[in-house]
Amino acid sequence: MPMANNVNGFDVARIRADFPVLARQIRPGVPLVYLDSTATSQKPRAVIETMDEFYRKSNANIHRGIHTLAEEATAGYEGARRRVAQFINAPSARQVIFTRNTTESINLVAFTWGRANLNAGDIVILTEMEHHSNLVPWQMLAEERGLRLEFIPVREDGLLDMDAYRELLELEPCLVSFTHMSNVLGTINPAREMIALAHQAGALALVDGAQSVPHFPVDVQELDADFLAFSAHKMCGPSGIGVLYGRKELLEDMPPFLGGGDMIKRVYLRSFAPNEIPHKFEAGTPAIAEAVGLGAAIDYLESVGMQAIAQHEHEIVAYALERLEEIPGVRVFGPSAEHKGGVASFTLQGVHPHDISQILDSFGVAIRAGHHCAMPLHEKFGLPATARASFYLYNTREEIDRLVEAIYQVKEIFG
């Protein structure tokens, strides 16, 4: 399949060659068109080989061993922490906590900082476009502690109602927790402005960066974020490891999340003293190889350039919106490409999104169908589900054309 031309020095063909799975044919003569990176990204050879090398040569447990393998494993794990800190411009690697994923990172904040600081009647502001991972932990805590949850409305154009947000801030919330980029609408929210407004109102701000950190530069100091959560598997890294960044003073004051090995400084029969950050929040043997893989993923993304990736995705999603909107019966959700990341959620009149996805798969086109762990947002638009095509650094205009051709086939099948 021909690839898009090298635009502004961004060589898509070279990048695609780094991802072994993209050479796969779903069946003879039907090459894979992978448009599901919002769910999980594919992995470059550099990440796969780095993790393989770790298991072949340096596999051991970390921190307390003094033999060569343990020291190599510890160096790889802590080196990855430093790479993450550099990647998001954290002041210190000690402010980077490794978790299993974005979901666990948000739960960690809810059930440590939240339990220690929130009481009956306290207000937490969320948005109507949140992933369940940034809804359910706060709902659970609200039920436990009698908190009040308020929600920034989503406008018909897919943008947040910032006037309504300003009015909600007059309620003096304790926390504002919001997605940097919607996994359904693709909306890129004005995080820096939202955080500044939250701070002016005396609230902390947690940013769900699952869809932003992989796709464009995110600087926690520039944003002035109190917490930032994201996952490796959406940014060319392995599954099973995520990140929580937090302000140093907040992390130091928060109680431990889980109890066990490595999160302790000293244990007595009836009490314990917790370790210093970040280890206080990393109980038990962590995902060591996965951390090493995350470090390799960051190296890979930075070798391409995050700004270049963002520009490429902007061009791809703009082209995708243009092509999708020309198909009779297709309705695309979310804002214009100017305010949007690499996501295009849509419906096709008279056809359920699950049927769209299944038929597209027969043409080698992999998209997602369903509520995308954002049921309240779909209810807001009166939808049971949407079909979602999502894009990353390895996607091409030709793949968008394949998607559109396959949708026309869906239309023909359903008459």
Image (spheres, rainbow, N blue to C red):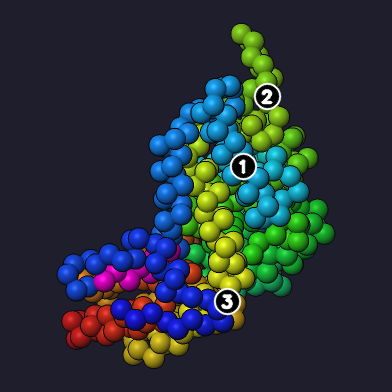
Q: Is residue 33 magenta?
A: yes
CA separation, marks 2 and 1? 23 Å
Identified by mark 2, the residue type is Pro
Label count reads 3
Circle 2 Cα neighbour tier, 10 Å, few/some/many (<14 / 14–19 / ≥20): some
Above or below: residue 375 compared with residue 352: above
The magenta span reads 31-37
Residue 142 in view (yes/no):
no
- Of the two numbered discs 1 and 3 in the rendering, the one whose residue sits closer to the viewer: 1
Q: Is residue 302 magenta?
A: no
Is residue 199 shown left or right of residue 358?
right
Residue 247 in view (yes/no):
yes
- Residue 44 in the image: x percent, y percent? 43, 58
Identified by mark 3, the residue type is Gln
Q: Are marks 2 and 1 in contact (CB under 8 Å)?
A: no
Kindly identify which residue carries mark 1.
79
Q: Residue at x 55, y 66 (%)?
A: 304
Frontmost residue, 80 versus 154: 80
Kindly identify which residue carries mark 2.
274
Q: Residue at x 56, y 39 (%)?
A: 76
Kindly identify which residue carries mark 3.
311
Quick one: quadrant of the N terminus? Answer: bottom left
* Lower sequence index among marks 2 and 1: 1
Q: Residue at x 48, y 28 (%)?
A: 60
Circle 3 Cα neighbour tier, 10 Å, few/some/many (<14 / 14–19 / ≥20): some
- Residue 86 in the image: x percent, y percent? 68, 52
- Residue 343 in the image: x percent, y percent? 47, 72
* Lower sequence index among marks 3 and 2: 2
CA separation, marks 3 and 2? 44 Å
